[in-house]
Structure formats: C-alpha cells, structure tokens
Image (cartoon, helix red, strand yellow):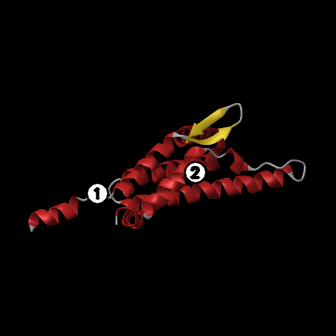
Amino acid sequence: MEEMEKKIIFKRNPVGISGGVILIISALLAWIEIPYLGGGNLIDITRLITGLSDFGGSEGALYSLVFIAVLVLVLGGGIVALFKHETGGGMAILGLIIFTIIALVLQSDLNKSLGSLYSVNIFSFLGIGYYLAWVGAIVSIFSKMIEKKIFG
C-alpha cells in the first residue's frame, strides 16, 4: 500500500514538465527582433534596460525593476513549472501580461508621437521567444487536462 502511495506522490506530469522547459527555453530565444540588427532575448533586454536606467533617472530605474520582474516571473515560472505546473504557468502568465502591457503602452506612445505621418506596429517586432513563452505558460496551466486527454 505504501509503495502505491509513493508512486502516486512522485508521479510527474510530462506535459507540465514540457511546459516548464518551453518557458525556460523561451527566455533564451529572441523576444524582440529588429530587422538588420538581429534579436535580443529576455535576458539581453533586461540587461539593456538596466544599463540605460542610469540615464533615465527614477523612471529608468522603475523600468529596470519592471523588466527584472518580468525576467524573474518568466524564467522563474519555467523552473517552478517543472515541479508545480499550474503555479509556474501562472507566474509566467503574469510576467507575459506585464510585458504585453508595456508593449501596448509603447504602441500608444508611438502612435501619439508619430501622429498620422507614419504607423509602426510594435507587435511586428516581437520574436519567437515571446510567443513560445505564451505556449509554455498555457501548456503548464492546463497540463493536467492535456495529460488526461493524451494519456487517458
């Protein structure tokens, strides 16, 4: 009886683990891709923002903290999702929502500053890492349901 309980306790959900691995890998892939200049992963973007925060005063420091939080939520969420799938996926979703809100605010500011002269879609610069993080977070959150559908 104890062996059966131990097997149930230590049974890992391969779908949830896959979601966590996808989240970790997504942080290392390009989140922003600028034509002819290449792309930067989430760690590079956070380093850049933190480096530039010295010139931005208190607002720059705030952006630096926000991007550090996004990095911790996505990368940490991937690590947590390896063990606690729904919790890690939720952490990553929170980081992704913050990143998306920042992108929407930047889009709004660009539209106001450029006016009707030129239209720039900031979401066209988002790279594969951003979208893969969404996939990993959603897979992690719904891992139990997906595992039941696949493995019965």
29 above or below 19? above
The answer to whether residue 74 is visible is yes
Is residue 91 visible in the rendered image? The answer is no
User: Looking at the picture, how far across and down is residue 16, in whole percent?
Assistant: 38, 57
Residue 41, numbered circle? none
Crowd class of label 1 (few under 14; some 14 to 19; many from 20; radius 10 Å):
some
**Name of the residue lying farthest toward the right:** 117
| Residue at x 44% of width, y 46% of height | 24
Q: Quadrant of the C terminus?
A: bottom left
Q: Considering depth in this image, is 14 or 124 the residue closer to the camera?
A: 14
Mark 2 residue crowding within 10 angstroms, few (<14) / some (14–19) / many (20+): some
Residue at position x 35%, y 53% from top? 82
Q: Which amino acid does the dot numbered 2 rest on?
A: Tyr
Query: Which sits in the foreground, 116 or 109?
Result: 116
Sequence order check: which comes first, mark 1 or mark 2?
1
Q: Is residue 10 left or right of residue 131?
A: left
Q: Residue furthest top?
A: 36
> Residue 33: where, in percent of width, then height?
65, 39
Tags 1 and 2 touching, CB below 8 Å: no
| Whole-number angstrom distance, CA of label 1 to CA of label 2 | 25 Å
The reply, left or right, for residue 148 in relation to residue 31 is left
Residue 49 position (above or below residue 87)? above
Circle number at residue 12: 1
Q: Give the secondary structure at mark 1.
A: loop
Point out the residue furthest to the left here. Answer: 1
Q: Position of residue 150 (x, y in %)?
A: 39, 62
User: Image point 63% across, 45% down: which residue?
Assistant: 57
Amino acid on which disc 1 is placed: Arg
Question: Which residue was labeled with disc 2?
Answer: 131
Label 2: state its secondary structure: helix
